[in-house]
Amino acid sequence: MDSMALRAFTSKKGSRNIKSTQYSTEKKTRDFPRVLTFDAETTADKYQNLKFGYFDVKQNDIYIYGGLIWDKRHITRKEYNTLKKYANTHLMRLFSLEEFIKIFYLEVYDRGTLFLGFNINFDLSRIIQDYGYGKNSGKGGFSFTLTEDDRFPRIRIKQLNGKSYNVEFVSASKDPHKKCNFKGHFLDVQRLACILTDNKSLSLESACEIFDTQIKKKAEKEHGKVTPRYIEYNIKDVKATYQVFQKVREEFNKYQLNIPMTEVYSAASLGKQALRQCGIRSFSEQNPKFSRKIIGNIMGAYYGGRCEVKVRKTPVKVTVLDFFSMYPTVMLLLGHWDFLIAAKMGHKTDTKAVQEFIDGFTLEKALDKDSWKQMNVLVELRPDGDIFPVRTNYGDQDTRNIGINHITYKDSVYYFLPDVLASKLLTGKSPQIRKAIRFISEDVQKGLTKTQIYGIPIDPKKDNLVKHLVEHRQGIKNAMREVAKDSHDYDRLDSQQKAVKIVNNSTSYGIYLEVNPEEDVEELEIFSNANFDSIGKYEPPGVYFHPIIGANITAGSRLLLAIAERFVLDKGEVHTYMDTDSIFVPPHLAEELSHLFDPLNPYDFEKTILEIEDGMEDVWFYGISSKRYCLFNKDGNKIDIPDGKKLFYKLHGLGHITNPFSRELCEKDHWHKQIWLDILKVHYNPELLDGILEKYDNYSVISNLSITTANLHRRFKKVNEGKPFGERIKPFNFMLVGQGTISNKKGRSSAPIKPIAPFSKNPQEIVELPFIDYKSDNILQGRHYWKPLSDVFDNYISHPESKFEGSIGVLKRRHLKPKGCIYVGKESNNIDMQCLEQSQLETFYDLKALEEYILNLTPSKAKEMGISKTTLFSMKKRIKSQKLSLNTSAVKKVLEHFHNETESVCPEKRLLQAGYHMNDVINYVHNLTPKEARSIGIRYRSTLQNLKKKAEQEQLNLNSSMMDKVVTHLLNC
């Protein structure tokens, strides 16, 4: 490996305080008595232009008015007559699109009516006249024009994260009402239904089933043709959407959260509001002057969940065990509620005591609750064969993954104490630390208030919200055992326990490490295990960003898994698989391992916190790599993959591919099961591989795509160029995208064809039809342009577990010796981009080191990188004029070599390379005399006193010009 990647904390250049996103304090509407519900029907081609739609307006659930709408741009005279006849027969109005737009602004803008839809982004984008891209705070999103009348505002839609979007009015320049700050009320009931049912996605049909609405949505076979039946289908969709809304509203009100439904963007929104209702203020509000350097060290110590296949391509019997409420449990063990309600977070150096704690740490102490309260410590060390999480490109993988491996590194890195203790358990060797920072909560915040959440009274001064929620949910689950599973009481209780689980999970991890990358590139200060200036995307902390809590929760979770691994190793066995909160072990060890953790139960009820998963006892396991495994039963030659609430298989990397099989052959939601049955057939009967590949040759790799961001839509610029509005691929269009395998230019090297075709519920039918190559805008046709599923199947079963050494059977941990570090931003997967290109992780570069590297480049070395002498001269000239851009192709070529050949030359690195430590600098500053200070350019006594004060507080900024002088003098001495 060349380098390991560490998370970084970003701060705008010149900023000194920690600033997080703040809640608006304005009073907001929570009740929406008046609702406009709308649904659009479109052409069935790739452009998906509006043909007609239906809307109705209700006041306090009573129908006021409504009607059909039609778009003269995309409807024939015959189709218009069909709509007109239907409207007359059913005594309803037929509005033109222009008339509906006036109604829309009258209701939604003037009257503040709630605009409701099921996937409203798509429906709103159908009624527009034109679109543009968002600016300023809306950058990355879309700006829609609905009317040429500039008295009315545009609508802006921006993706926030995942599948969450912000929809709002943008002030109109000639608005006679001067409603400059009114953003409107928009609710995508699909998204809120997903959040309240803990589902990743829901169709209107499935939402109607889950919420048991009176009107049930049913699929329509043929779309795009205006018929009486299709009109009835559209009207029924609107009525079904409103009934789902009524049920969702009823469920949401049970949460007793004082937040509008329109501002619930994810489950995290519920968790944040729960804390807000308790009067809890954020870490940044309470600690605005907290050392950014220490926060950077904390972020450098942050790693996500542990996931690995330890026994590869060798079927073994296992029992699956899951930790009960892993993150809430770890929060309680570490005492993080005190940190959350603290008036201030303090810290102190506690190196000697922490080293003694590590040296004396045993499995018995790991199972002592009192030990866990001592683990809120950040440790600086030089790894020397110890076992730690490492984020890097394993093997020949393009993406950076986290593996738990031996590591030896010449410089200091930071880990939280649970990771250090996990290494001690797994190696028997005490990591030798250089410094330990213990975090301490000081006093309790003022303004904490009593509240109720889902009927649970909470007094944050006395009650631990996380603990109360877990215990309340357990009480509900106990009550469920006393009633029949097919009863109304069971369904009611099940709904309650799911709701409590959603709130609890959303207050137990993610919000404490939330950062929200901005679109613009800015001058930044980067803090991690090194500090330097850079340019990149600023990542402002979220509302409840609390890195001490967030980073140590995952470290604590890895310690629990390490305890389980140590137990299994002591029995002379190995685990087969781990994933965040679960471990797969030999069945004969399961019961004893489960009860091993009983002493760590932090709740007021008796329960093992490592539970044997129902239905997953004594089953066969077959694993390929992380998140690619299957559990199955085997009787002779018969293989069966059980069905259940929890899937018995994972198929990471294929989730974006549409179901290639017909519904008769395979249920839509479980088509991956067929893939695993074939994988197992090949394992037990390798001679069947050719026949199975031949079967998959008949299917193509096709993905659904929705154009959800401006960056994604720009990829279609060439396709849209010069075309009228109706023939453009527009924002939020649905379509099908193929993975091309060949070039259209025979005999010449060029990018593969990327087929784009109209959306279809039977995707495999489109491969014989004409399609657009979104790279070239050419119209092509032929199955040979579409990648066969056989290629994916063949590659999938060969996918390595690169985190470990070995290919078959029990794998071995790697011993990593990284040459250096790179510093990265938020880890995220843009699902919408997955079928087009690999997501890029923001990387922060030390500008001074990069510029020095470029200035020292020789023409011959630059030529090896593909950079001409003229371009090299131009780059050096831009550096001298302070105008170097990281986005040019030449600089990107340099960056490919930069981290392989050099490390950051910031003062901290220079110190470490010379054998010094930060404590040496602190002592040196503390002992500086005024005369010595003047000799190195510190002229004023007050400046020296201020420097000494910062040294005492451990807040020295080694990246400042003054400290650069101090470090230089120290090294020269």
Image: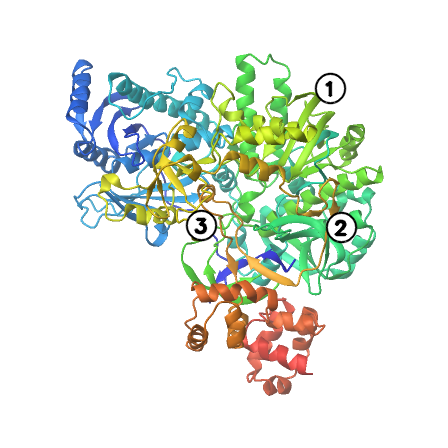
Label annotation for residue 22: 3
Q: Which residue is mark 1?
A: 636
Q: Mark 3 and mark 2 in contact (Cβ < 8 Å)?
A: no
Q: Nearer the viewer, residue 191 or 331?
A: 191
Secondary structure beneath dot 2 equals helix
Q: Which one is closest to the eye, mark 2 or mark 3?
A: 2
User: Mark 2 to mark 3: distance in Å?
Assistant: 39 Å
Label 2 Cα crowd, 10 Å radius (few <14 / some 14-19 / many 20+) = many
Q: How is the image coloured?
A: rainbow
Where does residue 431 sit, x and y in percent of width and height? 77, 57
Secondary structure beneath dot 3 equals loop
| Occupied quadrant, residue 965 | bottom right
Where does residue 832 sit, x and y in percent of width and height? 44, 41
Res. 230 in view: yes
Residue located 48% across and 55% down the image: 539
Q: Amino acid at mark 3?
A: Gln
Q: Which residue is mark 2?
A: 423
- Picture layout, residue 236 above or below residue 171: above
Q: Which one is closest to the eye, mark 1 or mark 3?
A: 1
